[in-house]
Image (spheres, grey):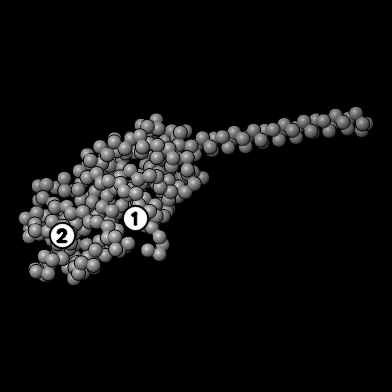
Amino acid sequence: MNMTNILLNYSNQSGRTLFVLISILTLVFTSNITIAEESSGKQRPVLKVCADPELMPLSNKNEEGMENKVADLLAKELGAEVEYVWFPQRIGFIRNTLRSEENGVYKCDLVMSVPEHFELAATTKPYYAATYVMVYIKGRGLDSVIEPEMLETLNNERKDIKMGLFDRGPAQLWVFYHNLMDNMVPYQFQMGDPKKNPTEVILSDLYDGKFDATIVWGPTAAYYASKNKDRGEMVILPLKDDPKRAQMKFVYNMSMAVRFGDNEWKEQLNEFINKQQEGINDIISSYGIPIVEVVAKPVANDDD
């Protein structure tokens, strides 16, 4: 082979190599653009929401809950369609929804409400606040109780007040510090049947007179009180945080949640909250849920 042929072969090989390199770089570059567009909230054609299928008034599979309606408002703002990944809100919810992948793609990108500074995900600014409440049915012997703490005084006189209480949550601490542990009627919060709403079950038993009072999440109490007026008038008494006991926390700011590191998406949600707070409040109020002022709270210290 003469020098001319060698040079021609080298030139052809170099040309093919250069073409392959350019093709690879082009593929990588365009792939990165696609990934960036898909991860950006502004390029999100589908709003994939992680939600509980049986957790009214927050959400259900018929998309009748407060969270469903706020998600609809958000989707309208984004020009997107809403899709849901349904999973019961119990242990493993975040792991099986927000953090879970299927064929290399996350199943969903947004949890509609978690406590502010939630440990398992990045949270937006709060868009509503709520508190645990003590509830009883009017006309059944507790009408003199107009502040939760008054129940302890009344029980000292009567000794027969029964409180239905879940096996987890801050209510147990309140009962302990108010000397009502002997008055508990225990209920399992994480029931075997995920289709059963535990708060609906305990409130139904309250209406049926199986105990005298209970402590539950305020939005759920307000919703079921508005739906069951024919069964009696529910008295709802908000619990307050105890400034002397950090663990006695009953008022929570509620935020939306995204994956850690999804900063652009989180900021877009913050913009939505700022712009649509009035509309969000209207949705919340339509479920009989009182609007509680969002008060800035510091991140809890692990030593508290």
265 sits left or right of 273 in the view: right
Point out which mark residue 136 bears: none
| Count of residue discs | 2
How many C-alpha atoms fall within 10 Å of the one at disc 1: few (<14), some, or many (≥20)? few
State the residue in front, 77 or 187.
77
Q: Quadrant of the N terminus?
A: top right
**Labels 1 and 2: the sequence-earlier one:** 1
230 sits left or right of 240 in the view: left
| Amino acid on which the number 2 mark rests in the picture | Ala
State the residue in front, 243 or 139.
243
View extreme (right): residue: 2
What residue do we see at 9% from left, 47% from top? 230
| Amino acid on which the number 1 mark rests in the picture | Arg
Q: What secondary structure is marked by label 1? A: loop
State the residue in front, 57 or 13.
57
Residue 212 horizontal/vertical position (percent): 13, 61
Q: Please give the residue where the numbered disc 2 appears in the rendered image.
A: 213
- Visible residue check, residue 294: yes
Q: Nearer the viewer, mark 1 or mark 2?
A: 2
Q: What secondary structure is marked by label 2? A: strand
Q: Please give the residue where the numbered disc 1 appears in the rendered image.
A: 90
What residue do we see at 16% from left, 48% from top? 225
What residue do we see at 19% from left, 68% from top? 180
Q: Quadrant of the C terminus?
A: bottom left
Residue 186 horizontal/vertical position (percent): 22, 65
What residue do we see at 23% from left, 67% from top? 177
State the residue in front, 21 or 259.
259
